[in-house]
Amino acid sequence: MTLVLLLGLVAAVVWKLYQLTKAPQDKPLRSVTLCLVCAALSYPLAMPGGASGVDTVAGHGAAKLAQNVLLLATVYFLMCFYLYSAADERVGKRRARREAVLVVLVAAVIIGAAVTVSHEVFVGSFATTDMTIPQAAVFYLVAGLYLMYALATAARWTRRYARLSAKPHSTGLWVAGAGMSAMAIACAVRAVIVAIRWGGGSVSSALMSAVALLLVVSILLFVFGITYPGVRTRFSSCRLWFRHRRAHRRLEPLWTLMADAFPHFVLPTDSLSWRARWRARGVHRRYHRRLVECRDGLVQIGPHLPATGFDDGAEHLARRLRDAVHAHKHASAEPTPARPLVIPRQRSREADVQELLAMSDALRLSS
């Protein structure tokens, strides 16, 4: 579970950093990216190996303090995502500044609590820390209450956006909202646990384990929710990429026939800049360019093709296409008016593509 969560956080950070390179001025995107970066940085500090390494270098308790400060920054940037996404940008910026003051005050309180007590107090985990020490109780209570407030507020905004969004964005928002709500509940329970233990009471280990498990599951839900729309969109893009790649290959026989007959219809790329030539080699551009070149050639041989009779089989269709190209080459010097190829089916781009693919398949089968 720990490895899955870490890998999920890393994947989310990489994805958002990639998106940020495409739109560096996008403040909401920048906020959610910083949110994930802080979360990813704080997670190793909660693991025994990472905490001991930091404590060895910076002193006992440094990992616990750094982890909690990063968590405060995580939820603050999460709130900024919604504030910068608000319709009134000026109000959003003003609210973000107020929230920044609040999170700085909270960070100052927990830092003050941590430095005014022996470092050994924060060496252990939340379950083993002696909460009867006031500084330890204040450290966990103040940080937990702020996390609960920020997460509950962000979850409410998330559900509001989910109602106004379409799929797949709404699905991701609902899942992320559920994760944030669960995290807020876990923080509230931990605040109650701190208060009980501060007063000298005890809490069962089963409840502590259940709260820890709830936090892990809720973080997984949050990470999945915010990455789901992007992953879904990228998956659809990959499917389209493979479809265009297959169609480009299927069109090769028809394109070869048209390119041999009308080489001047092949769109040149040599005169383009190196950047434009690199982009022209993309699958989508090559696919659409091949469609245009095939269609232009068919328009030229259209006068030599019958208006009907294209459902007589692949061999018959291929022979008619080759005969039309041959007739065009040996036509009189008087130019023949070009006309579109008449195909008795419903006209649409997809139907047009399917007809071109059928012609190309017929040429391949008859070769």
Image (cartoon, rainbow, N blue to C red):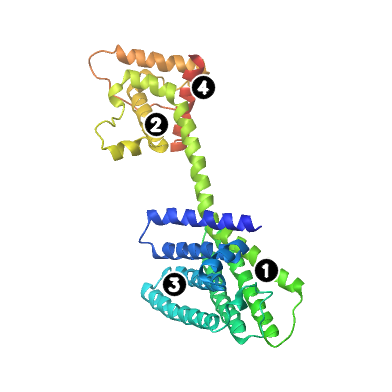
In the image, residue 60 lies at what x, y percent? Answer: 57, 73
Upstream in the sequence, badge 2 or badge 4? 2
Q: Which is closer to the viewer, label 2 or label 4?
A: 2
Residue 71 at x, y percent in the picture: 53, 70
Q: Amino acid at mark 3?
A: Leu
Disc 4: CA contacts within 10 A as few (<14), some (14-19) or many (>=20)? few
Tag of residue 212: 1
Q: How many marks?
A: 4
* Real-space CA distance between mark 2 and mark 1, rounded to the nearest whole angstrom: 57 Å
Dot 2, crowdedness within 10 Å: few (<14), some or many (≥20)? many
The type of residue carrying mark 2 is Leu
Toward the top, the furthest residue is 330
Residue 144 coordinates in the image, percent (x, y): 59, 77
Quarter of the picture holding the N terminus: bottom right
- The reply to whether callout 1 and callout 3 are in contact (CB within 8 Å) is no
Amino acid of disc 4: Asp
Q: Secondary structure at mark 2?
A: helix
Residue position for label 3: 83
Decide if residue 269 is in sight here.
yes
The answer to which of marks 3 and 2 sits earlier in the sequence is: 3
Amino acid type of disc 1?
A: Ala
Residue at the disc numbered 2: 291
Nearest the eye: 121 or 165? 121
Q: In whole angstroms, how far apart are the C-alphas of marks 2 and 4? A: 21 Å
Does residue 125 appear left or right of residue 332 in this picture?
right
**Would you place residue 316 above or below residue 221 in this image?**
above
Q: Which residue is mark 4?
A: 311
Closer to the N terminus: mark 1 or mark 4?
A: 1
